Image: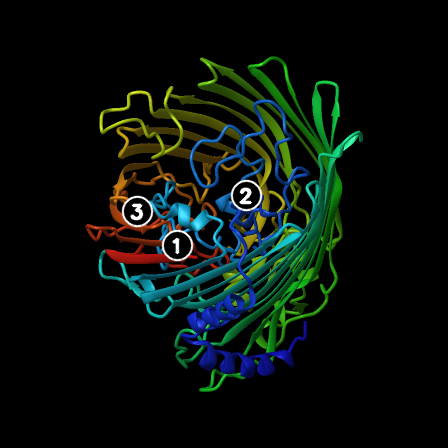
Amino acid sequence: MSQLSSGPRRRARASIRYVGRRGRSLELGFCLLAGLLVGLPLQAAANESSSGLPFFQIQNGDVQPNHTSPIRQFEAVRGAGLDAARPPGRGVQPVADFLPRLRQHRDSRPLPIAPLFQFDRAPGDMPYRTDNIRLPLGTDDALRRNADHFKISGGYATPGDTLEALGQATLRRPEGYLRAFARGTDARDGFEGGDGQQVPFEYSRNSQQLVLGWTPSADFEAFAVLLRDDIDDDATPSSRLDNLETDRLVGRLGFELRDVPGEAVSRVRAEMRIRDVERVNNNFDVRDFTVAPGARRIEVENERFFIDGRLFGDFTAGAFENRLGLDWIVERRDGDRLTDLNAASPEPRLNGLASPLFPDIAVAEFGPTFETATSLSADDHMRFGLGYRFVHADAQDVDTAGQGPFANLAPGLPATASNLYDFYYGSTEVEQNDHLLSARAVYQHETLDDRLTLFGEVARTDRAADSKERYWAGTTPPPQAANRLVGNPELEPERHYQAAAGFIFDGPDWIDFGRARRGGTTLLPGAWQISGALRFSHVEDFITRDSARLQSGVLRNDGALIFRNVDANIFTAELDGQWNVTTNLSARANVIYSYGQNSSDKRPLYGIAPLEANLLLDYSDRLGSFGTWSLGGKLRLVADQTRVDDNAVTGSGFDEGETDGCAVLDLYAGAQLYDRIGLRLGVENVFDSDYREHVARHTLDSRQRSRIAAPGRSLFVNAIVTF
């Protein structure tokens, strides 16, 4: 990355983008879609699930790497009782994510890539609502997932005065398929919280995706995916810096050979993914900058590049179905923080290097995995996983110092990344090697005619520190030491020791939520499901953010933001009940509780969600012979969160105080006609409740954060047409 010269040139380009892009997301989306509609001939409709690579799985373009465990995702090896697809979304699942993303490790990455037609949340409220259970998709869900060649959808929501337009076009032939989509979102204004607080919420976003598949035979498929995501002028009210622009490019390439007759290996899959992102944040383009004594314009330029891949083969040995694989990932990251060296002026200069924020970081991981599944009997099933990963991390540009008032950590000590690590941790060794070993065992028992499933699992999973936790190097002048951001190259990998147990109990007439259809409108006493799970994790060397105050391994007492290892315990309990009361009426109740403790420092973990319950009622019926309609409501109840780590003097300070509980009611309705046209509308936060999420979307990159109100009473409408 260019250091000083790129700042002014990039700023000129950004100014052009700002004028040209404001309000044009929808226009770009529709222009691309129009081209697709003209260029793709019609074919006979086919089942969506048989059209190659599942479209709803292509949503992993996020720029945050998975520096986690050797088994990045514990995939099911197809065996009796273990071959059912795990449902997307929320709720109790027999097998949880191998190593869930923890809020304590949340990075300030841009909004994640979103699935195309998944409006379980209105445009505009996504960043500031964290409901554990989301609204059902309604009667037009079938339209969003059907195999029609063309789909056009649009939506509006009052938070942010947000408009959204989406389009998808599909071409299928026996020898292959092509699918393309475009999505544009424009949040043009702020929103009002329940107490009248005005929240500056705005962004412009364009996403395009192309999926190509080649299926010359029933047992072979090759695929390629190209995704572009562009986010501009993203106001971040909880942080000092807004996301001026993010350009993200994702490519995937792979093949799968399956059901190979007479061969020892029955299935082979290989794929490679490339992710490239360039991001610019500053404090003077999206929001107004006030020229005042001591005020400085700041701009952060961040470039990240990943290339990763996976190769695995499935084979059978006796009663065991097995998968042997190899995973690898390489990340490069570079970033600078630029500033005005002189007093702030009406026009930005950006003529100084405040600090090399990410000093040319390189992280490489690779290692084998082995998974196996077997059935001990018709009702008892076991699954095992084992993996090793070698991680090599290094930072190259550790001797470049900041300029002007940022030039020194202390008098006579240049503010290089190397000196920063030595100043706070007593080490200048930035090259590190980690060895990660993970294992997992899952037991599943089915009884009562397979209506009751009992499961238990134990695991050890290792997670290596990511590039920010290791090498972040944000310096400030000595009087502002509490605002320094200091990674720790000496961090040990986290080691999670996990245990879980739970159940899923289905009534004799249960199919799915809203899908028990048995005569008339009488009660359906057997159309229910109850599930629950308890999960506990003891983490050795948990990587926590903290304030420097002479802890073990920390040499300073100036309040700088640092990373260190501690031990921690995390516990989660969840109970979920669903009942199709009649052929038309369905109800659901979900309760989840989480507990986190920094056991080394005897204080709560920051970022732990409070006790939450969600209650849903959903009614659906037919519109004569030409459609269906539905309406429903959801009541969300959240308890106070009083277990917080909000004191930077005695703790980390990364909770923003205690959070009051709340009750939020959402109402929604929808209809679909002739399996072609769908409409969905609703009112969220009907009673205009004043509340704030305890763990809402915000950046942890700065101590100068403010708690943001969730949207007050809001309206949304979505429409979809397929043909």
Count of numbered labels shown in the rendering:
3
Give the distance between the C-alpha atoms of the residues marked 3 and 1, in whole angstroms. 30 Å
Left or right, 580 with reference to 273: left
Left or right, 666 with reference to 8: left
Of labels 2 and 3, earlier in sequence is: 2
Kind of element beneath mark 2: helix
Examine the rendering and report whether any part of residue 689 can be seen. Answer: yes
Residue 627, disc: 3
Examine the rendering and report whether any part of residue 653 can be seen. Answer: no
Judging by the rendered image, the residue that carries numbered circle 1 is 126
Callout 2, which amino acid?
A: Ser
Callout 1, which amino acid?
A: Met
Q: Are marks 3 and 1 in contact (CB under 8 Å)?
A: no
Give the distance between the C-alpha atoms of the residues marked 2 and 1, in whole angstroms. 28 Å
Residue drawn at point x = 39 percent, y = 79 percent: 290
Q: Quadrant of residue 1?
A: bottom right
Residue drawn at point x = 58 percent, y = 74 percent: 338
Judging by the rendered image, the residue that carries numbered circle 2 is 49
Of labels 3 and 1, earlier in sequence is: 1
Say few, some or many: other residues with alpha carbon within 10 Å of mark 2 (under 14 / 14 to 19 / 20 or more): few
Give the distance between the C-alpha atoms of the residues marked 2 and 3, in whole angstroms. 24 Å
